[in-house]
Structures are given as structure tokens and as C-alpha cells.
Image: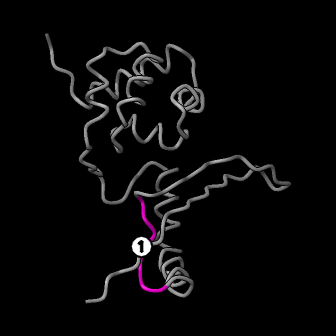
Amino acid sequence: MEILTREDVTALILSAKKQAGITWEGIAAKIGMSPVWTHSACMGMNAMPPEKAGLLVAALGLPQEAAGILEESPTKIWEQTVPTDPCIYRLYEVVGVYGPTIKALIHEKFGDGIMSAIDFDMSVTRVEHPKGDRVKIEMSGKYLSYNSW
């Protein structure tokens, strides 16, 4: 029996998604999670709780072994320093241009600290606009202040 890797499970998920003709929103609804979290976990960037991994495996008809792999804590690795995919690059550009502004405004409103990417929610929606539809990305992360010793 061949042992599945994290990359194998991701490939199985993408193949099953395509064969089923289902969206990330549809998969997320089947496991009771947000589409953002569901995609991220399916791509190996988050560990799934056992219940959610089991629901995903059942919903997509994956091998049972895949559930255990989906539950493992991931090692998050970015392969490129600057992304070359145009959609991802534009988000990188937003952080490059507005990152210092966002940081300054967080510090003014909350003090010296950061926004958590662990206790975090995000949604992506389409907004109609006379100049062309807009992509609306909302992020909400718990504020974490730096400790003073």
C-alpha cells in the first residue's frame, strides 16, 4: 500500500472537486466552514479538526487515509519570495504599498501589536460597480499586543 503525502491529498481534492463540478463554497457548505478556510486547509495551509476532515473525505469520496493527513499540522512554505501569478502579485503589491499604512493605523487604534492570522476570518465577495465589478476582501484578525517586560 502506497502512503499518501500532503501533496497527494491536495491533488486528490482538486481532482475530486473538478470531477464533481463543485465550487469551494459548495465544499465549504458540506463541512460547515467558510470557503476561505476550506480552500486554505485543502491546500495544506491549515490543519483540519477530525470532524471536518471526515466530512471532507466523505463529501469528496477520498480515501479514508486522507483524513489523518488533513488533520496534521502543516509546515507553511512559500516557494517564491515575490509571487509571479498576477492575482497573487497584486495582493503582494497592496501589502507592499499599504502595509506600512495599515501598520500605522493599527498602532494608532490599538497600540503596539499585530493582527492575528491564527484567530482570523476572511471573506471574498463580488460587488457590482458602475466602473466594473469589484473584488471585496474583508479580513478580521484578533488584535495581539506585544508584551512589555
What's under tag 1, amino acid-wise? Leu
Provide residue 112's location: percent of width, then percent of height: 42, 85
Nearest to the observer: residue 130 or residue 23: 23
Look at the image and tell me in which quarter the C terminus lies.
Answer: bottom left
Residue name at image x 39 percent, y 23 percent: 54
Question: Which residue is farthest left?
Answer: 1
Nearest to the observer: residue 41 or residue 128: 41
Tell me which corner region of the image, top left, top right, bottom left or bottom right, holds residue 5. top left
Q: How many marks?
A: 1
Nearest to the observer: residue 147 or residue 116: 147
Residue range in magenta is 111-117
Q: Main secondary structure of the magenta part?
A: strand
Provide residue 19's location: percent of width, then percent of height: 49, 13
Which residue is label 1 attached to?
Answer: 144
Question: Which residue is farthest right?
Answer: 130
Residue 143, magenta (yes or no): no
Q: How is the image coloured?
A: one colour
- Position of 22 compared to 147: left or right? right
Look at the image and tell me in which quarter the N terminus lies.
Answer: top left
Residue 115, magenta (yes or no): yes
Vertical side of 120 occupied by 49: above or below:
above
Vertical side of 46 occupied by 71: above or below:
above
Question: Which residue is farthest top?
Answer: 1
Q: Residues within 10 Å of mark 1 (few under 14, many from 20)?
A: some
Residue name at image x 31 percent, y 32 percent: 70
- Position of 61 compared to 23: left or right? left
